[in-house]
């Protein structure tokens, strides 16, 4: 296997929303969702990277920033549905 890294680019809104979601998911019983122990390595790496990325993650107005980011992302998605994703 080649030693090539893959770069994923996210907007600040995407990073903030994904970071929040991963944090909430990690607080639940992930063993039900993660059926392969090998998946934990990229999950932890992604979550750790995102924890450092979004500006103001510990800011007093974090909830407002998160709500605004969610709103903006929903607006850009239009009529996107789960069926279209899968």
Image (tube, helix red, strand yellow):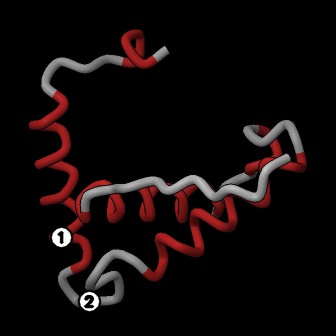
Sequence-first disc among 2 and 1: 2
Q: In this view of the protein, which residue sits in the foreground, 50 or 17?
A: 50
Numbered tag placed on residue 65 in the rendering: 1
Q: Position of residue 57 (x, y in %)?
A: 34, 81
- Counting other residues with Cα less than 10 Å from the Cα at mark 2, is it few (<14), some (14-19), or many (20 or more)? few
> At 65% across and 60% down in the image, what residue appears?
26
Residue 84 sits above or below residue 50 on the image: above
Mark 1 secondary-structure assignment: helix
Tag 2 residue: 59
Q: Residue at x 13, y 48 (%)?
A: 71
52 left or right, relative to 58 = right
Do the residues under discs 2 and 1 have CB atoms within 8 angstroms?
Answer: yes
Distance from disc 2 to disc 1, alpha carbons, whole Å, reads 9 Å
Say what secondary structure mark 2 lies in: loop
Which image quadrant for residue 54?
Answer: bottom left
Seen in the image, is 13 located left or right of residue 2?
A: left
């Amino acid at each position: 296997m080649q030693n090539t890294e893959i770069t994923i680019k996210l907007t600040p809104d995407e990073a903030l929303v994904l970071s929040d979601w991963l944090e909430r998911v990690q607080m639940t019983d992930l063993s039900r969702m993660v059926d392969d122990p090998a998946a934990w390595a990229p999950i932890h790496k992604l979550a750790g990277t995102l924890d450092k990325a979004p500006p103001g993650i510990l800011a007093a107005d974090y909830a407002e920033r998160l709500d605004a980011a969610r709103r903006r992302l929903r607006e850009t998605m239009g009529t996107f549905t789960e069926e279209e994703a899968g």
